[in-house]
Amino acid sequence: MWQKAKKWLLIGMSITSIFALAACGSNTSSQQGGVGLSEEEAVDSSLWKDKYPLQYASYLKNKEGGMTEFGGSDKVPKADTEPEIKKLFAGYGFSKDYNEDRGHVYAVEDVTSTKRLKPNTPATCMTCKSTQVPLFYKKLGEDGYYNTLFSDIAKQTKHSIGCSDCHDPKTNELRVTRPAFIEAMKRRGIDVTKATRQEMRSYVCGQCHVEYYFDKGKVLTFPWDNGFGVDDIEKYYDAKQGFKDWEHPDSKAPMRKVQHPEFEWWITGTHGTAGVACADCHMPYMRDASGEKYSSHWWTSPLKTLEQSCTKCHTQGTDWLKQKVHDIQSRTWELQTIASKEIAKAHDQIKLALATPGADQNLIAQAQRKVVQAQWRWDWIAAENSRGFHNPDMALNTLGKAILMAKETQELAQQAMAKGQKAQPVKPAQ
Ligand code: HEC
Ligand code: HEC
Ligand code: HEC
Ligand code: HEC
């Protein structure tokens, strides 16, 4: 009993001390102050190097590759490990080109080379990729930026995600530079300018690592009006009559794609609700050879830095932590792959029903609605990059529902066909 209490006491104490530690970081950053660059100069992260060599050196590590069991930093196709992806996204760009995410320094290169681009792709797709975007907003106005073609904006873009995306060059304070985050939080009654320092350690990430859509085909919008949950956001899109990202060529269902909802999974998950920030795990404190402390700016899998990322709060040791992450991720993966297979079958069954003369159209329409709901739920886990870790119980709960809905879709399609096949033999006799 005492052992257990003592363990939580220790965790409690370490959490207090990490927040105290974090506070020291703030002094450091404000003492060091701004970097003395204009907004135009500050988009080039290499110009921050002289003033902040430690942070800059760790930033360069974002070039490193290397995979972990379920994540990692190499540009490998997601369909290599989950082949159903090709089928689930048939008729949509994600069936042609959909890779594991990698370091921030590659963002511009990867977005400009993806086969998902079309001649009419709007500039909006550049929003989370380059330090230059806030300047484009300033120069062109929000409307002007969204009305520019991606191909035109790409010609002027050369700097990938960097210092000025999250830091004010005058003061070095953390800042949010993307209007979609500020506006969506405002609609939830949250004023981002009043955020605490600990909140900012996640908000800077939440401006890009989120679910979003292009309102009116181009205005970047975060669908958080009803909340951050899977059902809340589904309801948001349901209220937009006829909303779809594409039509599936087999089932003819009006599909929706989930983006990369790390912020939403995190904020509703164990660590998010306990006040543990993205930066606590993904930007742990490091020491250089001389013992000077700095925040790691190598945004990568925390499995590569378990010691620094986790053991300040968890006293069980890195082997235990590694095992826990493995357990969560492998259980998630097991259900995720069952779900994708069942959803693929569901599309096939609807296709068969559509090809069956006399099949019940009402039941087919119900099946088409259900397959959208099933795939939406699977995609919340498939598109999120932590393979369940940011919110383990919601991930399993959501996948459980996805599998059930896929099975229900198959049954509806079979019932629709059964009616058709029953009706058919009667026809010639008439
Ligand atoms: C409690 C620690 C923790 C917190 C807090 C946390 N993460 Fe993670 N994150 C992880 C772990 C563990 C993984 C899984 C890494 C793997 O599979 O290799 C991960 C994976 C990721 C990945 C994919 C990395 C890869 O290798 O492809 C991204 C992106 C990510 N997190 C972003 C975020 C963002 C954004 C936030 C805040 C909104 C956040 N994380 C909060 C621990 C954390
Ligand atoms: C994705 C957001 C993001 C980007 C990009 C970014 N930083 Fe940071 N930076 C942070 C966060 C979060 C902290 C922790 C701040 C805190 O706790 O107050 C931080 C802290 C710092 C600090 C304070 C001292 C320390 O190490 O904690 C310095 C200096 C700094 N960053 C420099 C840089 C430089 C130089 C670059 C570009 C090479 C950069 N940052 C890019 C988010 C970012
Ligand atoms: C300006 C938008 C933006 C901001 C701000 C941002 N990210 Fe990212 N992040 C991206 C994009 C885009 C990628 C994928 C790049 C690629 O694959 O080319 C990415 C990739 C990652 C990865 C995967 C790296 C890998 O090696 O697989 C991690 C981890 C990550 N970000 C964490 C964070 C954290 C933590 C923060 C906040 C401190 C943050 N990001 C802030 C846009 C952003
Ligand atoms: C700033 C403190 C802090 C950091 C850093 C932190 N954790 Fe946690 N962790 C917590 C708290 C608080 C809980 C919730 C404990 C409880 O149940 O009350 C938790 C819960 C967990 C759980 C239980 C499963 C769950 O999500 O419900 C696991 C596993 C875990 N953490 C792993 C990790 C790993 C791995 C890392 C590093 C990548 C990490 N944590 C970093 C504070 C932290």
Image (cartoon, grey):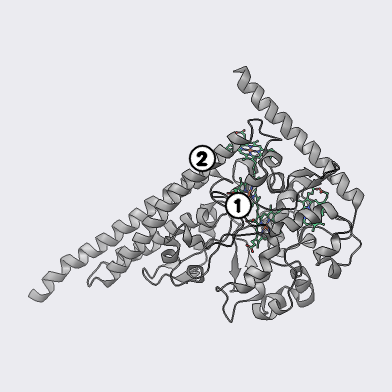
For disc 2, the neighbor class at 10 Å (few under 14, some 14 to 19, many from 20) is few
Nearer mark to the viewer, of 2 and 1: 2
Can you say which quadrant of the picture contains the C terminus? bottom left
How far across and down, in percent of the image, does residue 384 sit?
56, 55
Dot 2 and dot 1 residues touching (CB under 8 Å): no
Which residue appears at 89% of the width and 50% of the height? 30
Question: Residue 107 appears in which quarter of the rendering?
Answer: bottom right
Report whether residue 151 is seen. yes
How far across and down, in percent of the image, does residue 246 sit?
47, 71
Please tell me which residue lies in front, 280 or 275. Answer: 280
Task: Check disc 1 and report the residue beneath it.
Answer: 264
How far across and down, in percent of the image, does residue 395 sit?
51, 47
* Location of residue 102 with respect to 275 vertically, above or below: below
Please tell me which residue lies in front, 130 or 364. Answer: 130
Which comes before the other along the chain, label 2 or label 1?
1
Task: Check disc 2 and report the residue beneath it.
Answer: 327
Report whether residue 430 is seen. no
Which residue appears at 81% of the width and 67% of the height? 44
Q: How many numbered marks have been drawn onto this rendered protein structure?
A: 2
- SS category of the residue bearing label 1: helix
Q: What amino acid does circle 1 point to?
A: Glu
* Left/right of residue 2 with respect to residue 249 in the rendered view: right
- SS category of the residue bearing label 2: helix
Point out the residue furthest to the top here.
2
* Left/right of residue 198 with respect to residue 424 in the rendered view: right
Point out the residue furthest to the left here.
429
Can you say which quadrant of the picture contains the N terminus? top right
Please tell me which residue lies in front, 112 or 206. Answer: 112
Q: What amino acid does circle 2 point to?
A: Asp
For disc 1, the neighbor class at 10 Å (few under 14, some 14 to 19, many from 20) is many
